Amino acid sequence: MTRPIIAARSAIALELEPGRYHWCRCGRSQNQPFCDGSHKNGTDFTPLEFTIDSKQRRTFCRCKHTGNPPFCDGTHKTLSL
């Protein structure tokens, strides 16, 4: 499998309402950290669907290398340039 594009070398904190969301795994989405369908143009990636049950603030990964997708685990701090 190909490696994802690093969308940003930082996380993003967002407050989300309850609902179903799709986290971008490929890094190509212009709607980071969420999927906009860009993966359909020549990648093997699919979005990660997740559900938020109650309104909450979460920190999302944008480097696409987290060990805890879709949430940031600080991996972006260890990636080489």
Image: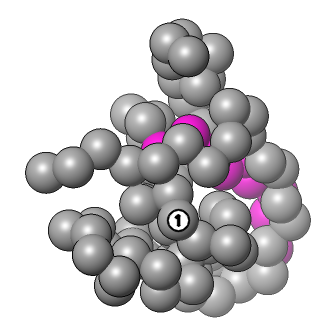
The residue depicted at 79 percent of the width and 48 percent of the height is: 12
Q: Is residue 54 visible?
A: no
Look at the numbered disc 1 and give the secondary structure of its residue: loop
Left or right, 32 with respect to 69, comes to right
The way the protein has been coloured in the rendering is one colour
- Could you tell me residue 9's position as x and y percent? 68, 32
1 or 14: which is nearer to us? 1
Q: Which residues fall within the magenta stretch?
A: 55-64
Q: What amino acid type is highlighted by mark number 1?
A: Arg
Q: From this viewpoint, which residue is outermost toward the left?
A: 1
Q: Quadrant of residue 48?
A: bottom left
53 or 68: which is nearer to us? 68
18 or 48: which is nearer to us? 48
Above or below residue 46? Residue 72 is: above
The residue depicted at 86 percent of the width and 65 percent of the height is: 15
The residue depicted at 51 percent of the width and 57 percent of the height is: 27
Q: From this viewpoint, which residue is outermost toward the front?
A: 42
The residue depicted at 59 percent of the width and 25 percent of the height is: 76
Q: Which residue is mark 1?
A: 28
Q: Is residue 18 magenta?
A: no
Q: Quadrant of the C terminus?
A: top right
